[in-house]
Each structure stands twice: as structure tokens, then as C-alpha cells.
Image (spheres, rainbow, N blue to C red):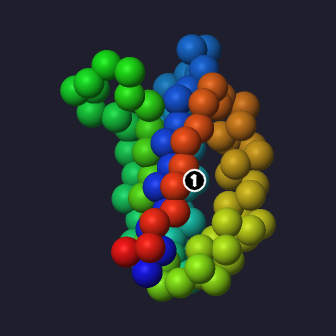
Amino acid sequence: MIRHIVMFTWKEEATAEQKEAVASELGKLQGVIPQIRALTLGGDAGINQGNHDFALVADFDDVEGYLAYRDHPRHQAVIAERIRPILAARAAAQLKV
């Protein structure tokens, strides 16, 4: 199994509506991209200073499933239209679990 973990820090000028749109659109991907086996996402709980603002964890059966998700046009549209306009920083990793 491949676990994809990505974390975002938003620009200071990002609005609540923009942040909610990211979460909403990413959440819809599980119903659109069949290779997603599990999807967890949400804003940081605010427990530690210096954390990223938002995280997503997605599981896939294999590398091919992850690549299908990564390259899927709907996923790419969410990145281009919702994430990039408000993105200050990003970190990601793909783990074999």
C-alpha cells in the first residue's frame, strides 16, 4: 500500500472561503477517483506552533493507483484552481505501508 501525505501552509491573505473550498474539493475526489482507498483531510488542530495549516492523507493499493490519483484531471484542477492561488508552502511524502 502507498500512503500519500501532504501538508499545506496558506498565504496570510487566504480567506476562510478559499480554505473551505480546498477541503471541500479535495474531499470530493474519493468519489471521483476510484484508486483512492482511504482519504483523511483537515485543518491543523492548533496544538503546536509552526505546523502547516492543512493536511491530507490518502491510501492507495499500489504505486499505479497513486499515480492515477496524482495525474487525474480533477485532482490537477483542484491544485490549479483552489490550492495554488493560496499556497505559501507545501511538504509531501509517499510511504510504503
Coordinates of residue 45 in the picture (x, y in percent): 27, 33
Horizontal side, residue 72 vs residue 38: left or right: right
Amino acid type indicated by mark 1: Glu
Q: Residue furthest front?
A: 96
Q: Is residue 75 left or right of residue 15?
A: right
Residue 41 at x, y percent in the picture: 40, 52
Q: Disc 1 on helix, strand or loop?
A: helix
Q: Reply above or below: 71 against 82.
A: below
Which residue shows up at 65% across the image and 40% down it? Answer: 83
Locate residue 4, reporting x and y percent.
Answer: 49, 62
Q: Is residue 17 above or below residue 93?
A: above
Residue drawn at x 53%, y 84% is: 62
Task: State which quadrant residue 17 falls in.
Answer: top right
- Farthest residue toward the top? 12
- Residue, x 22% and y 27% (percent of image)? 47
Against 68, is 28 above or below? Answer: above
* Image quarter of the C terminus: bottom left
Left or right side of 51 for 8 = right
Q: Nearer the viewer, residue 97 or 70?
A: 97
Residue 39 rendering spot, x and y as whole percentages: 41, 65
Q: Quadrant of residue 84?
A: top right
| Numbered label tally | 1
Residue 93 visible to the viewer: yes
Q: Residue furthest left?
A: 47
Tell which of 60 and 26 is nearer to you.
60
Image quarter for residue 14? top right
Name the residue beneath numbered marker 1.
25
